[in-house]
Amino acid sequence: MNIQTESHISGQPIKEKQAKRPVRMVRWTIIVGLLLALLVGGLVGFNAFRSHMIAQFFANNKPPPANVTVAEAKSEVIPNLLTAVGDLVAVHQVNVTSDVSGRITDILFKAGSHVKAGTPLVQLFDTPDQGDLANFKAQAVVAELQLDRAKQLAARQFGPQSTVDQAQATFDQAKAGIAKTEALISQKLVRAPFDGDLGVRQVEVGQYLTAGTQIVSLTDLSVLYANLTVTEKQSSQIKVGQTVRVAVDAYPGRTFEGKITTIEPQISTDTRNIRVQATIQNPDNILKPGMFATTTIVLPEKPPVVTVPETAVDYTLYGDSVFLITEKKGDDGKTSLSAVRTFVKTGNRVEGRAEILKGLKPGDKVVAVGQIKLQSGMPVAISTDPAPPIPAEPPRY
């Protein structure tokens, strides 16, 4: 059948009937959307409520004040000191040797003993020299007699003056031989050149001793030198006659005083340091040459400066600071204390106290103990515990 040939059939297209969405599906969509909205709103409200309660909790729950030990900044004159390192050397120290070679026949000293200048130490074999001495003495006696006889004859005009001159020369030669032989004999008796303490013996009886071989060390411990070095910048502050305090590891807590006696006139081009020598009396002979020494040069006094205990200063890469105690009044009218970090400029540290060149004034109170648990602005309470001794020292067991 064709539409064009059938006249009773309309030419309008046939429209399909649209399907309607089920009512149940729409209802569920609305319910799920409301539930999601309620869930999101609940979460947002809960977070806002929690933040508000946390802020309110911390606002009302303030930590108790931290107990700290407080020290007061003082204006005082502190010693102007220059610290350097060095070592100790003896003023008189030598390795005793012999001027001549020979066989040792006797050792006249005891190792470690104290001897006086001129004390015999070692005797070398000198019998041939003693024989030569006796020979020259006999020649001197004969030459002296001949000289007297020649003078008497010449005085009476019975002898020529040339005979007197020859006799005088013979007598002088004999005396010269005596002096030379006595010098050789004295060289073979080794003596102590100065007062001091002997060291370990290095020779034995019967040993052939060559000239220059060490016999024993001899050290005068009554006076020592302290050799130290200071920088080129510090060289302008030192002068001959200034007091030097020396400390050694062998006697902790004890100092020995001396005076600067020599300042090297030139500065080393390698290190840019200058050598300084101080003389120290050692009456008890407890200081030994070769000891490492920490030296302190006492310089002229400087004007008064503000100082605090060294424990009060916090040294960091960002700068030196202290916790300054400040007072503030609350809403209730009560006064409370707080610790505020304050940056300062420090100077030297002497005997447990630190110079404060900038940042504090006399009378300011700073935290001396307890800074580790503090933050700037925290409330504090002054502890009744005594402050640590200055300078603070760790306990010894």
Image: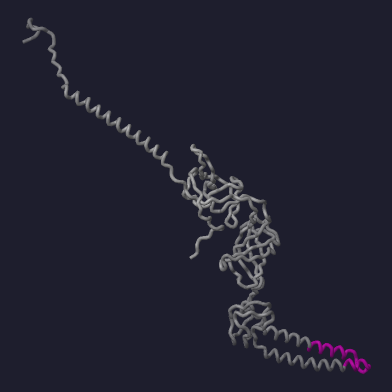
From the viewer's side, name the closer residue of 205 and 243: 243
Query: Is residue 229 toward the left or the right of residue 35 in the image?
Result: right
> Which residue occupies the extreme left position in the image?
1
From the viewer's side, name the closer residue of 334 and 68: 334
From the viewer's side, name the closer residue of 338 and 46: 338
Residue 123 placed where, x, y %? 65, 86
In the picture, the quarter occupied by the N terminus is top left
> Which residue occupies the extreme front position in the image?
333
Is any atom of residue 270 visible in this view?
no
Please report the residue visible at 60 percent of the width from the left and 85 percent of the height from the top: 208
- Residue 169 vs 97, above or below: the answer is below
Does the magenta segment cover residue 225? Answer: no
Query: Is residue 241 toward the left or the right of residue 367 in the image?
Result: right
- Residue 36 vs 372, above or below: the answer is above
Residue 58 placed where, x, y %? 41, 40
Residues shaded magenta: 150-174
The answer to which image quadrant residue 228 occupies is bottom right
From the viewer's side, name the closer residue of 64 and 199: 64
The answer to which image quadrant residue 79 occupies is bottom right
Please report the residue visible at 74 percent of the width from the left and 92 percent of the height from the top: 135
Please report the residue visible at 70 percent of the width from the left and 84 percent of the height from the top: 186
Residue 389 placed where, x, y %? 55, 58
Residue 265 placed where, x, y %? 70, 60
Is any atom of residue 27 visible in this view?
yes
